[in-house]
Image: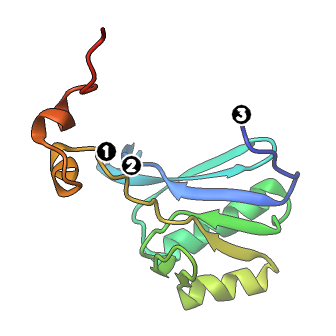
Amino acid sequence: MWPAHVAGEKLFVDYAGTTIDIVDAATGEVHACQLFVAALGASSFTYAEATFTQTLPDWIGSHTRAFVFYGGVPAMVVSDNLKSGVTKACFYEPGVNRAYAEMAVHYDTAIVPARPRKRRRSRSPCRSRRAGLSPSCATSGSSRSSS
C-alpha cells in the first residue's frame, strides 16, 4: 500500500540515474545531460528538465524552475543525498549545503534529505558459524527428521 500524502506537502526531487543526449540544433554537437526530476507526493504530477551537470547552480536552478512550473512551493522538498545539496548524509541529522538551505529559506520551505538506506544483513553460513551452528545446519532447511 502506498503512503498517504497531503496535497502540496512534499515535492520529491532527484536526478534520474541515466544521462540523456541533447543535440545542439545550431552546431549538431551532442551533449550528455543529466535529467532532473521533481514529483509532487500527493498527485505524482511530474516536472523534468535536462541540465549539463549535477552541480549546485544546476541543482538550485532546477528547483526554482520546478516551483515556477507548479505555480507554488511545497511545504517541504525531499531530496536524495546528492553531494551538491547534502553535505552529510546521516540517518538522524543530515547536513544541507549552505546555498541550498538559503534557497529553502528564501522560498519558505524545508529541505528534508531522504534517509540513507540501512544495510541488510545477509544470512550467510559465516553468520551461523559465529552463532555456534555447524555449517551443515546453516545450509540445510532443518536438522529435524520428517518422521
- Where is residue 117? Give x, y as percent: 46, 59
Residue 62 vertical position relative to residue 98 in the rendered view, above or below: above
Label for residue 1? 3
Give me the residue at 59% from left, 65% from top: 79
Position of residue 31 measured from the top left corner of the image (x, y, whole percent): 32, 52
Whichever of labels 1 and 3 marks the residue nearer the N terminus, that label is 3
Q: Which residue is drawn at 65% across and 56% down?
A: 12
For the residues marked 3 and 2, what is the alpha-carbon distance in whole angstroms?
43 Å
Using the image, determine if residue 93 lies above or below residue 142.
below
Q: What residue type is labelled 2?
A: Asp
- Give the residue number, with chain letter if any, for mark 1: 28
- Nearest the camera: 57 or 43? 43
- Please, what is the three-letter code of the amino acid marked with disc 1? Gly
Task: Using a 10 Å C-alpha cutoff, classify the residue at mark 2 as few (fewer than 14 neighbours), some (14 to 19) or many (20 or more).
Answer: few
**SS at mark 1?**
loop
Q: Name the residue under label 2.
A: 24
Per the image, label 2 sits on a secondary structure element best described as loop
Contact check, label 2 and label 1, Cβ < 8 Å: yes
Instruction: Say what secondary structure mark 3 lies in.
Output: loop
Q: Amino acid type of disc 3?
A: Met
In the displayed orientation, state which residue is furthest to the front: 147
The quarter of the image holding the C terminus is: top left
Marks 2 and 1, how far apart at CA? 5 Å
